[in-house]
Amino acid sequence: MAHTKKQRTAGDLHHRVNPRGAGLRFEWIADAERVRVEGIAALTSLRHGAMLSVSLQTLNGIVRFQFNDAKTAQAAAHLLGLSGGTMSYMVLIKLMYLADRQMLLDHGRPITGDRPFSMKHGPVLSNVLDFITHGPTREPDSAWFTLIGEPRGYDVSLKVATPPTDELSRYELQLLQQTYEKYGGIGKANRWDLVDLLHKILPEWKDPGGSASRIEYVDILRAEDWSDEDIALLKSQADSAWFLSSLG
């Protein structure tokens, strides 16, 4: 499976993803002698090429990712383009969740970085749902509203003929297409058929009744039989990426 590394300056972290069993093993390489990782109490001393040692106690924390507004908008627009420019917004929400979920399993991070929740009609991504239900009132500068119009009836449509994809990797574009090909037809025929299917095949979804409950990424990984070791290593990656992004 192809994986593109980002080049960083000395002291930053690089990672590579190796398939192993049911999950993925994350190995961290440090260019500097010492690396501070948010969420891990101690500073770990490393030599170049050494694996970061992670305590399984990190599993008690929350795995979090930075929300990427531009990638979210482009991913949604790409799915709409595959559907001819218009789609049921309920189906779009489900396809976005499914693509994020698969990207998490394949590469240890979602496409969007959005926060997943369980709601009555299945899993949703928090910001995506807000964009659709509240329009630009909350986030008027979001790239979403440059590419995607507000709902008309139960559908959303593209505002541009050819949406950009420069924020998305080739792997992400391929994954979005595969997600659409596998599930888009189900939703296109009847959006409720897709809702019912996801209730059956996504064990991390729990019916919260009329409210909403957070879906933790750890729940998704455990539902797919990831080991505690692999989950802890993924969490170290997410914590490090969060810390590095906080530095600006």
Image (spheres, rainbow, N blue to C red):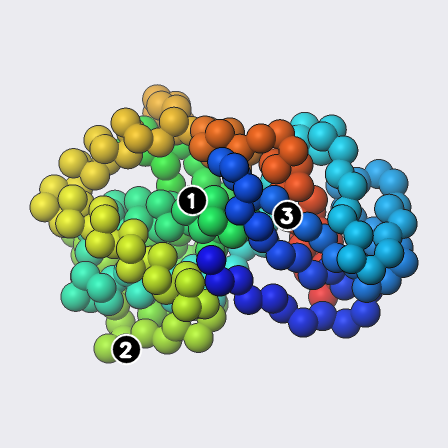
Return the residue at label 3: 26
Indicate the position of residue 114 as horizontal and vertical percent values.
49, 49
How far is the residue under mark 2 from the one under mark 1?
Answer: 26 Å
Tell me whether circle 2 and circle 1 mark residues in contact (CB < 8 Å): no
Per the rendering, the mark at residue 101 is 1
Whether residue 114 appears in this view of the structure is no
On the picture, is 175 further left or further right than 71? left
Return the residue at label 2: 162
SS type, badge 2: loop
Query: What amino acid does circle 2 point to?
Result: Thr
Indicate the position of residue 12 as horizontal and vertical percent values.
76, 63
Give the image quarter of residue 71: bottom left
SS type, badge 1: helix
Residue at the image point whose x is 86% and y is 46% from the top: 44
First in sequence, mark 1 or 3: give its number: 3
How far is the residue under mark 2 from the one under mark 3?
Answer: 36 Å
Q: Residue furthest left?
A: 189
Query: What amino acid does circle 1 point to?
Result: Arg
Tell me whether circle 2 and circle 3 mark residues in contact (CB < 8 Å): no
Label 2 neighbourhood size at 10 Å, few (<14), some (14-19), many (20+)?
few
On the picture, is 49 further left or further right than 238? right
